Amino acid sequence: MSDRKPFLLRIDRDILEAVQHWADDDLRSLNGQIEFLLRRVLRESGREKKKKDDEET
């Protein structure tokens, strides 16, 4: 299981509501949707840190 670090996020109310609706449509929690979106952007920009399992193959 991955390590998770809690942190406070201050975000515009309209953005939060839009992401919440998107999460509802995708059957995810708000937290899960934010993490999904951040991972996708990191991967697309080439900034995602590779996992140890991926480096060995």
Image: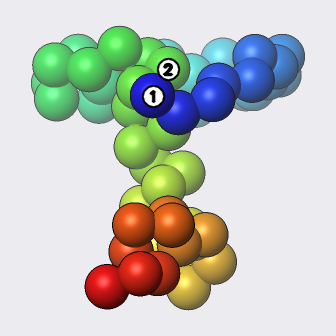
Quarter of image, res 10: top right
Residue assigned mark 1: 1
Camera-near label (2 vs 1) is 1
Q: Residue at x 66, y 17 (%)?
A: 13
Quarter of image, res 26: top left
Q: Nearer the viewer, residue 33 or 21?
A: 33
> How many numbered tags mark residues here?
2
- Quadrant that contains the N terminus: top left
Where residue 39 appears, x then y in whole percent? Answer: 48, 55
Taking the image as shown, residue 2 lies to the left or right of residue 25, namely right
Rendered view: 17 above or below 42: above
Q: Residue at x 56, y 22 (%)?
A: 16
Where residue 34 appears, x then y in whole percent? Answer: 50, 34
- Label 1 element class: loop
Where residue 24 appears, x then y in whole percent? Answer: 23, 16
Taking the image as shown, residue 12 lies to the left or right of residue 53, namely right
Mark identifier at residue 31: 2
Mark identifier at residue 29: none
